[in-house]
Image (tube, rainbow, N blue to C red):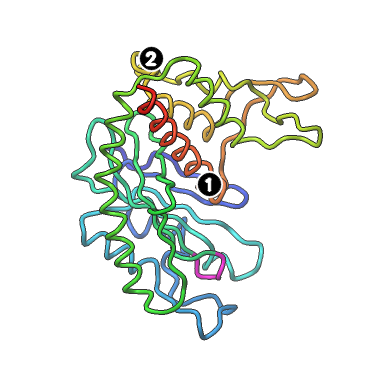
Amino acid sequence: MSALANRFSYRGLRKLDGTRPLTEIEMREVAPSIFAAEAHESRSARYSYVPTVDVLHGLQAEGFAPFMVCQSTSRIPGKSEFTKHMIRMRHPNQIGKGGAPEIILLNSHDGTSSYQMLGGWWEFVCQNGLMRGTTGEDIRIKHSGDIIRNVVEGAHSVLRTLNVMNDQRSDMLALPLPEDARRVFAKAALALRYDDDENGNSKAPIEAERLLQPRRTAELGDASSLWRTFNIVQENAVRGGLQGRRADNARTRTREVKGLDQGVKLNKALWILAEEMQHIMRKAA
């Protein structure tokens, strides 16, 4: 496999995607907060500090490897070494034709975030990666108490959900969606992605149907399944680049979702939408 798929830095976030496991040298350059030796000076004595790298090493011992890291930046001098960060980890031996399950870690060392762990799925075709967003599997751990034990237990809890997620993926792949259901899915996704203006009109520069257009011919054959509908809509909503028009009718392109928090929120909401659509369609069958 090639070394790195995507590396960029922009206002508010730095990110590195890999098509093979990332080294600690590569991760340190983009997300130094992962390796912070102590908490930010603003934290009180009640703040229990455990370096994210300790959790990283624990999951590496279980066979998982980091394939993506990103970190928020800060304008406050000296704080960029402690800000919110994310690691997406996969088991290299479990990466197949359809993709691979992931453990997603979010944390900060400046008090802006608790430990958060989610189950995820990296889709091989589009490489956009969904996040499971049901409440029961969104593990949050405060920086207090026996944090080491809580983090370890949380990681094992997320690991147990990955098999369930794989089963859901298989079921969604086998579940065809009628065109009206696909349009409803796209409209809901567009509403999640864009706010309304003061008059209650959507600020979206495109129609919902644009989110249903696959970017690769490989997806045309089975684009009507719930899983492919979900992945096509998700990638279009997150990656942007779709041609549209602003309110003044000037041509524009949709923007990529680059904010860490915004990306997590949108991914989780789209997963919940897919799960609910799955339940509705199964009940109607």
Q: Residues within 10 Å of mark 2 (few under 14, many from 20)?
A: few
Q: Are marks 1 and 2 in contact (CB under 8 Å)?
A: no
Residue 111 higher or lower than 22, as above or below:
below
Q: Amino acid at mark 1?
A: Lys
Q: Is residue 168 left or right of residue 47?
A: left
Which residues are the magenta region? 108-112
- Residue 216, how many percent across, how many down? 41, 19
Q: Which mark is residue 278?
A: none
- Residue 86, how many percent across, how many down? 44, 55
Q: How many marks?
A: 2
277 drawn magenta: no
The residue drawn where x is 52% and y is 64% is 113
Q: Nearer the viewer, residue 186 or 45?
A: 186
Q: Residues within 10 Å of mark 1 (few under 14, many from 20)?
A: some
| Earlier residue among tags 1 and 2 | 2
Residue 119 higher or lower than 5, as above or below:
below
Q: Is residue 53 left or right of residue 72?
A: left
The residue drawn where x is 46% and y is 73% is 143
Report which quarter residue 244 is drawn in.
Answer: top right
Q: Is residue 143 left or right of residue 246?
A: left
Q: Nearer the viewer, residue 263 or 6?
A: 263
Element assignment for label 1 = helix
What is the quadrant of the N terminus in the image?
top left
| Residue on which the image places disc 2 | 220
The residue drawn where x is 39% and y is 54% is 136
109 drawn magenta: yes
- Residue 157, how many percent across, how many down? 30, 58
| Residue on which the image places disc 1 | 265
